[in-house]
Amino acid sequence: DTEVTQTPKHLVMGMTNKKSLKCEQHMGHRAMYWYKQKAKKPPELMFVYSYEKLSINESVPSRFSPECPNSSLLNLHLHALQPEDSALYLCASSPRDRGVHEQYFGPGTRLTVT
Amino acid sequence: SQQGEEDPQALSIQEGENATMNCSYKTSINNLQWYRQNSGRGLVHLILIRSNEREKHSGRLRVTLDTSKKSSSLLITASRAADTASYFCATVDSGYALNFGKGTSLLVTP
């Protein structure tokens, strides 16, 4: 299984809502990532988890809260988002966080904040 | 942080033609990777070239890397309509984060 899955595919939420994005992989990868991508822009790294521990937080606002319950799952909890947070949120995984590795990306969750 | 810069930003060609995209970067790298993205969906890894390699092939793809000029190119030969997508280069330095370039939007018309 060389697939990274993400749910939901689309999400519309109000600024006062709390929602979660989910990501799953069963490739035995020990590094998982969250990226944010605005339209016609490249992905921007948000968080890196290595061996289920948060190793990188790229100065992301606290309204985004990542969680790695186990080595296969990665969540992104959303609370009190702003309209400018509307974007495609991509999850990715790789065998390790360092070294020469490609990353495997999920299809993304398209988030709209109203 | 974004390090790479691709050019051209957009490229339109006909099926059967070759497409060449260039990527420049600013700092020392461990490796450079190219990804494809269809219609705002997930990225697909195409090819990885290490800093001590100069050229690599994979099917219709050819990637070159010139570390002295801090640049790379991706050549897609005999393009097909299905190659229509955005292409990103991404560099990896001593760490683990992919630093993506701005991307090239490729349109292949029948």
Image (spheres, coloured by chain):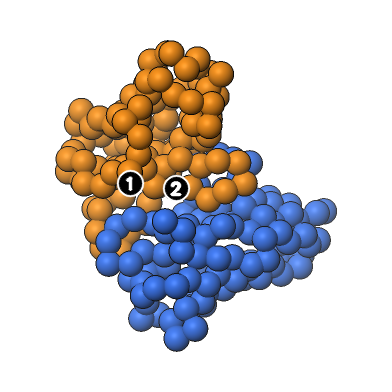
Chain colours: A orange, B blue
Q: Quadrant of the N terminus of chain B?
A: bottom left
Asked whether the viewer can see residue B63, the reply is no
Q: Residue at x 62, y 52 (%)?
A: B86
SS at mark 1? loop
The residue carrying pointer 2 sits among few (fewer than 14), some (14 to 19) or many (20 or more) residues within 10 Å by Cα, namely many
Q: Pick whichever of labels 1 and 2 is earlier in the sequence.
A: 2
Q: Residue at x 33, y 71 (%)?
A: B30
Residue A86 pos. (x, y %): 53, 30
**Mark 1 is on which residue type?**
Glu
Residue extending farthest to the bottom is B68
Give B27 or B37, whichever is nearer the viewer: B27
Q: Distance between the residues labelled 1 and 2?
A: 9 Å
Residue A41 pos. (x, y %): 57, 48
Q: Mark 2 points at which residue?
A: A44
Q: Which mark is residue A58?
A: 1
Residue B89 pos. (x, y %): 51, 62
Q: Left or right: where does residue B11 sit relative to residue A94? A: right
SS at mark 2? strand
**Mark 2 is on which residue type?**
Glu
The answer for which chain carries disc 1 is: A
